[in-house]
Image (cartoon, rainbow, N blue to C red):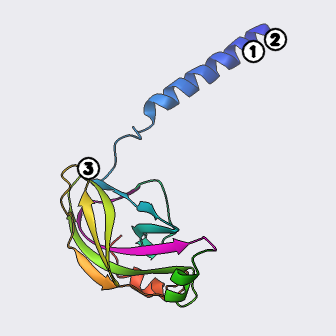
């Protein structure tokens, strides 16, 4: 009995340790990639977000953690969203047509370099939202910079975006 247990444990040990040596290194990516981050900023009673609109060619939910996307020439569909949670924001809610959310979206063209780390940026100017990808190492734009008109009745959970997301390369 003791000999059988020793042989079984030895075989299990060998199988586990040799299996670990044959697994691929998870820290190295299989293809050239870029790290992409969303951006969130609290501005008074409004949370301003800049994030991916589409990921894997589908409408993407907001994600705090950075995403890994392919390097190279990409068409990146991004959105700027303003969430309002405070009850005392009646004036802003009236400006937004009674909605708790406003924002806009745009397709950005980018030529992303391997191992580049970028963040989606936005700048609000009156009724316009300007969006771009910014290289975190250099602080320079990593994509074209586009301004779009803010939409007061912005619905991000609508199936109509699936056809738009299909045009994104990410």
Q: Are marks 1 and 2 in contact (CB under 8 Å)?
A: yes
Vertical comparison of 80 with 118: above or below: below
Structural distance between the alpha carbons of marks 3 and 2: 55 Å
**In-image side of 98 versus 23 (left or right):** right
Q: Is residue 63 left or right of residue 150?
A: right
SS of the residue under disc 3 = loop
Which region shows up in magenta?
67-87
Q: Which residue is mark 3?
A: 115
Q: Which residue is mark 1?
A: 5
Mark 1 burial class by Cα count in 10 Å: few <14, some 14-19, many 20+: few
Asked whether the viewer can see residue 101, the reply is yes
> In this figure, which residue is indicated by the disc labeled 2?
1
Task: Residue 43: name its quadrant.
Answer: bottom left
Compared to 13, does 119 lie above or below?
below
The secondary element bearing badge 1 is classed as helix
Q: CA distance from mark 1 to mark 2?
A: 6 Å
Determine the residue positioned at 32% across, 65% down: 121
Q: Residue at x 35, y 82 (%)?
A: 167
For the stretch drawn in magenta, the main secondary structure is: strand
Please tell me which residue is depicted at 58% across the width and 88% down the height of the picture. 98
- Residue 131's tag is none
Going 32% across and 59% down the picture, which residue do you hit?
Answer: 119
Q: Is residue 72 left or right of residue 28?
A: left
């Amino acid at each position: 009995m003791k000999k059988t247990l020793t042989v079984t444990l030895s075989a299990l040990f060998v199988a586990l340790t040799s299996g670990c040596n044959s697994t691929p290194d998870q820290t190295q990516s299989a293809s050239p990639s870029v790290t992409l981050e969303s951006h969130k900023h609290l501005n008074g009673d409004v949370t301003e977000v800049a994030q991916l609109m589409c990921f894997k060619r589908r409408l993407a939910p907001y994600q705090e953690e950075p995403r890994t996307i392919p390097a190279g020439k990409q068409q990146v569909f991004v959105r700027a969203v303003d969430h309002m949670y405070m009850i005392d924001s009646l004036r802003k809610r009236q400006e937004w047509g009674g909605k708790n959310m406003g924002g806009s979206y745009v397709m950005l063209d980018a030529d992303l370099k391997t191992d580049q780390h970028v963040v989606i940026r936005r700048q609000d100017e009156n009724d316009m939202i300007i969006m771009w990808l910014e290289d975190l190492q250099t602080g320079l734009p990593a994509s074209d910079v586009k301004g779009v008109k803010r939409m007061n009745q912005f619905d991000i959970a609508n199936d109509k975006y699936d056809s738009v997301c299909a045009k994104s390369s990410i």
